[in-house]
Image (cartoon, grey):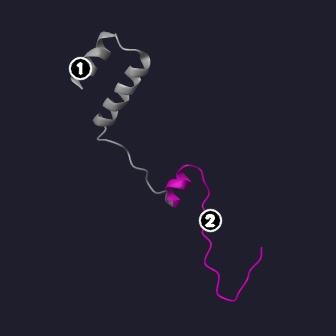
Amino acid sequence: MAINVARIGSGWVDKTEARRVLSRLERIAEGGRKRAVKATPDILAAAGIAVVEVPPAVEGELNHV
């Protein structure tokens, strides 16, 4: 890893390789890979997505809208 950092700092690395190494360094600095968080109604509402909770239908009862 130290060799890659030195190579990037010297400017002798092509852009694709530099991006790959920098991306890896950023992941390490942030504590690894980020996991997806399950969306809750509060998170969806904060993103501007409307959440409508519909109560379960009673067995034998059909309500058509």
Mark 2 and mark 1: span between their CA atoms? Answer: 54 Å
3 up-or-down from 42: above or below = above
The three-letter code of the residue at mark 1 reads: Ile
Location of residue 15 by image quarter: top left
| Image position of 38 (left or right of 23) | right
Residue closest to the eye, 2 or 48: 2
Q: Which stretch did the figure color magenta?
A: 41-65
Q: Residue at x 23, y 20 (%)?
A: 3
Which residue is identified by label 2? 52
What x and y, as percent, mark residue 12? 34, 10
**Number of numbered labels in the structure image:** 2
Q: Residue furthest bottom?
A: 60
Q: Is residue 49 magenta?
A: yes
| Image position of 60 (left or right of 9) | right
Q: Earlier in the sequence, mark 2 or mark 1?
A: 1
Q: Residue furthest right?
A: 65
Q: Secondary structure at mark 2?
A: loop
43 up-or-down from 22: above or below = below
| Image position of 58 (left or right of 62) | left
What x and y, as percent, mark residue 24? 34, 31
Q: Is residue 64 magenta?
A: yes
Q: Residue at x 43, y 21 (%)?
A: 16
Q: Which mark is residue 3?
A: 1
What x and y, as percent, mark residue 54? 62, 72
Q: Main secondary structure of the magenta part?
A: loop
What x and y, as percent, mark residue 58? 64, 86
Q: Residue at x 24, y 26 (%)?
A: 1
Residue closest to the eye, 20 or 39: 20
Q: Residue at x 31, y 38 (%)?
A: 30
Location of residue 50 by image quarter: bottom right
The three-letter code of the residue at mark 2 reads: Val
19 up-or-down from 45: above or below = above
